[in-house]
Amino acid sequence: MISVIIPTLNEEKLLPRLLGQFTADLKQRFNLEVIVTDGGSTDKTLAIAKKYKAHIVTKRPDAPQTIAGGRNSGAWQARGDVLVFIDSDNFFADPGYFFPRVKEVMRRQDVVAATVKVQVDPAEQRWYDRFWSAFFNWLFFLENKIAGAGMGRGNCQIIKTSAFRQLGGYNEKLVSAEDYDMFHRLIKIGKIVNIPEVVVYESPRRFRKLGYAKVIWLWAWNSIVFFFTG
């Protein structure tokens, strides 16, 4: 079984696009369970999750309000032997290809995690989005394949459940760079595979709000701080 874990917080606008991809046929064909782990939404997010028959996990009262905590809450209740963490403003280019390819890769004994190509939603894509998507995907490929640093954008991280539990899940004390931290630890216990032919689309809302220059600076600064201080 594959468990798909979707952290949410007031995502009524974009969540239906992702959950709508999980048809009854798709879930049955690839033995999927869909878990929405909510951080305290006050809009229609939970109603939408119920409409699409997702398993809902709500934030623990004592848990920190971080993306790491949201992912962990869903993962600890997951029944699958593979965990697919995907952000609620993302969606699959081709779910009918994504899941069989992921199953094929994750059957390998030496593999503990995988990453895929992330691109901006074609419906909202601008020429510079294509440039930056290509750059980010190339950079993460180099980090995994050549540098051996371990990297996978939090948009979509694929992890074997056994490896996830061995490492104790995401570090809930981190308010950012939790995705980098997880893959940095994963590569020490096994192999991380890039699956470049598998594509996940993301919303460009972060880039539109902050601009690419600021996003890159923030990512770089987070990585530097994490590298030197943990």
Image: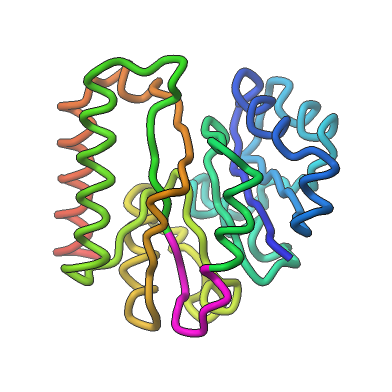
Give how far across and how far down residue 221 sits, in percent.
Answer: 16, 45
* Front position in the image: 193 or 168: 193
118 in the magenta segment: no
Q: Residue at x 73, y 30 (%)?
A: 20
Tell me the quadrant of the picture where the C terminus can be found.
bottom left
Task: Locate residue 130: give its quadrant.
Answer: top left
Magenta segment: 105-114
Q: Residue at x 39, y 81 (%)?
A: 190
* Front position in the image: 106 or 202: 106
Total labels drawn: 0
Give how far across and how far down residue 133 sits, in percent.
Answer: 28, 35
Tell me the quadrant of the picture where the N terminus can be found.
bottom right
Give how far across and how far down residue 40 sits, in percent.
Answer: 65, 35
Instruction: Specify the color scheme.
Output: rainbow
Task: Locate residue 149: give its quadrant.
Answer: bottom left
Task: Locate residue 111: give its quadrant.
Answer: bottom left
- Along the horizontal axis of the image, is 90 left or right of 134? right
- Along the horizontal axis of the image, is 113 left or right of 84? left
Answer above or below: position of 207 versus 2.
above
108 in the magenta segment: yes
Q: Residue at x 33, y 80 (%)?
A: 188
Give how far across and how far down residue 222 sits, in percent.
Answer: 22, 48
Q: Residue at x 27, y 21 (%)?
A: 210
- Along the horizontal axis of the image, is 86 left or right of 181? right
